[in-house]
């Protein structure tokens, strides 16, 4: 299996901004320190991008743009390997720019990354530009900035990675997240090896080029393309790692960075996975406490944890089958749970889905799991998880063998019984990866302006403990704590929104350690 990101499916927190996730389990991000070449100028200025109106690029997903909002799209070419330069080959990076007709006193461009890794920044920017009324950014921000999103290399419209069959994704997601039988564990390891070999056969050494280090340099190319001398950036979840990497490489080009749903760059793959197991375990406990006290909204309120455990055990023996013959295996149930824990608004759906599964209807479980995995009604998958796999394994090697991962599975089951084993098994993906990693740099962003780091105490995907560590590691990090549940806080938490807006617009830096209630 391989590492994959966990995505929220709630309507309120629509952004799929998450931590990296292991394909085959939940995942954490990794960090390694390495020497870097001088990240200065790479030659003469490139020509500005050729922007063209593209309202159609958002219509299918979000409907026609409202009056006064203009979308333009462009593509820039970046080196496959920034150290080698353009002569060694280039790849396209897709951009979208949203501009409000009500814009006044323009400051510059706010570049956004929604996380993943592998989530489309083009789609994210298009949605954020719709404004607060439709779940986007505050009008006070949209009136002062162009909003630009880009699909990171390997994702969406930017040289998308495509090396995993739909049948292998079905096998990955449907597999038992805690394969206790040695044969089942060996099957999980073999699946990860087959996926890795297929990607290597298609891309070879080019797989290393999909690293966060390379994407951070692409981000500086985006900054130059929009004509800003310094970067103003909003990064969610994995986007916080991308922003931190940028600050390390280009500290003097930082105007303002907001890193929400913070990832600790210094953690290795094992520590990151264990941290996320603890985060989701806490989130499920919070769901259970809510469910037990809300029988009108949660039909499994008598025993939420017991209901899930029973459903998983039954699925391992005789899974409920839908009208189309699809079986609700333990894996699909597991990812339905994962999908629901990113935000409190998903909790009622989870309670109902488990209740209906117990009554013989797996449809709601499939709805939740498919919304997370991106599985279409036709059984086909998009590019997101292939990109997520490529980025995670390009960022750091997992220096463990299958026997060591098997031991972690058993150890983590004792610590975090619902999510620990899956996160351990997920380490198999990058342990089998056939090409060298290109680790991102870690350490202080010496010379950078103050950087805002936002952490939520009940965040399952990027557990809160990572936020103060990121702020400290940057040297210029300023920590803002949201005391609440869910993954990421801006702009739906009013106190956080006030602080972030003032920082983005006026560069007003809050007191380090500011706490915002839910």
Image (cartoon, grey):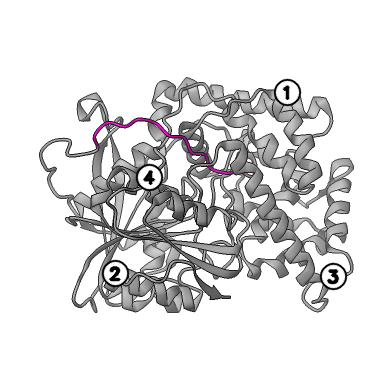
Mark number, residue 368: none
Pointers 3 and 2 in contact (C-beta within 8 Å) = no
- Could you give the CA–CA distance between mark 2 and mark 1, rounded to whole angstroms? 51 Å
Label 3 and label 4: CA atoms lie apart by: 44 Å
Q: Where in the figure is residue 140, as x and y percent of width and height?
A: 32, 78
Instruction: Estimate the spatial distance between the alpha carbons at disc 1 and disc 3, rounded to whole Å.
Output: 39 Å
| Sequence-first tag of 4 and 2 | 4
Q: Say which of 178 and 336 sits in front.
A: 178
Occupied quadrant, residue 10? bottom right
Say which residue label 1 marks.
403
The magenta stretch is 27-38
Q: Which quadrant does the C terminus fall into?
A: bottom right
The residue tagged 3 is 301
Q: Secondary structure at mark 3?
A: loop
Determine contact: label 1, label 3, CB under 8 Å.
no
Residue 504, position in %: x, y? 32, 68
Mark 2 or mark 1, which has the lower sequence index? Answer: 1
Whether residue 238 is visible: yes
């Amino acid at each position: 299996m391989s590492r994959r990101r966990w995505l929220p499916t709630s309507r309120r927190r629509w952004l799929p901004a998450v931590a990296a996730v292991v394909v085959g389990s939940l995942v954490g991000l990794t960090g390694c320190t390495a020497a870097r070449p001088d990240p200065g100028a790479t030659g003469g200025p490139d020509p500005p991008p050729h922007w063209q109106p593209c309202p159609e690029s958002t219509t299918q997903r979000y409907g026609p743009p409202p009056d006064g909002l203009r979308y333009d799209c462009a593509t820039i070419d970046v080196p496959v390997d920034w150290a080698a330069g353009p002569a060694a080959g280039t790849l396209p990076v897709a951009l979208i720019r949203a501009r409000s007709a009500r814009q006044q006193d323009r400051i510059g461009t706010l570049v956004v990354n929604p996380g993943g890794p592998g989530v489309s920044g083009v789609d994210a920017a298009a949605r954020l530009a719709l404004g607060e009324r439709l779940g986007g950014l505050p009008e006070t921000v949209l009136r002062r900035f162009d909003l630009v999103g880009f699909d990171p290399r390997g994702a969406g419209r930017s040289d998308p990675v495509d090396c995993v069959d739909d049948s292998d994704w079905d096998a990955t997601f449907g597999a038992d997240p805690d394969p206790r039988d040695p044969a089942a564990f060996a099957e999980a390891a073999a699946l990860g090896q087959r996926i890795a070999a297929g990607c290597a056969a298609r891309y070879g050494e080019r797989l290393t080029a999909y690293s966060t280090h390379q994407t951070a340099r692409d981000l500086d190319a985006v900054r130059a393309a929009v004509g800003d001398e310094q970067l103003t950036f909003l990064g969610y979840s994995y986007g916080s790692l991308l922003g931190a990497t940028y600050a390390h490489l280009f500290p003097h080009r930082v105007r303002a960075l907001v890193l929400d749903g913070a990832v600790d760059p210094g953690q290795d793959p094992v520590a990151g996975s264990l941290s996320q197991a603890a985060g989701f375990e806490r989130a499920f406990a919070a769901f259970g406490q809510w469910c037990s006290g809300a029988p009108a909204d949660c039909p499994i309120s008598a025993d939420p944890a017991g209901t899930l455990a029973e459903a998983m055990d039954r699925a391992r023996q005789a899974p409920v089958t839908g009208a189309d013959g699809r079986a609700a295996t333990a894996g699909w149930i597991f990812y339905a749970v994962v999908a629901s824990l990113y935000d409190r608004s998903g909790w009622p759906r989870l309670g109902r889905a488990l209740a209906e599964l117990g009554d013989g209807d797996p449809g709601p479980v499939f709805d939740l799991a498919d919304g997370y995995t991106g599985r279409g009604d036709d059984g086909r998958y998009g590019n997101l998880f292939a990109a997520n796999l490529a980025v995670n394994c390009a960022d750091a090697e997992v220096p463990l063998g299958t026997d060591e991962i098997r031991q972690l599975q058993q150890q983590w089951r004792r610590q975090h019984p619902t999510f620990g084993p899956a996160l351990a098994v997920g380490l198999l993906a990058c342990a089998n990866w056939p090409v060298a990693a290109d680790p991102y740099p870690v350490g202080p962003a010496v010379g950078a302006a103050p950087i805002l780091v936002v952490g939520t105490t009940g965040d399952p995907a990027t557990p809160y403990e990572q936020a103060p560590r990121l702020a400290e590691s940057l040297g210029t990090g300023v920590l803002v704590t949201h005391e609440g549940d869910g993954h990421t806080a801006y702009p739906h938490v009013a106190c956080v929104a006030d602080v972030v807006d003032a920082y983005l617009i006026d560069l007003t830096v809050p007191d380090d350690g500011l706490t915002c209630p839910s």
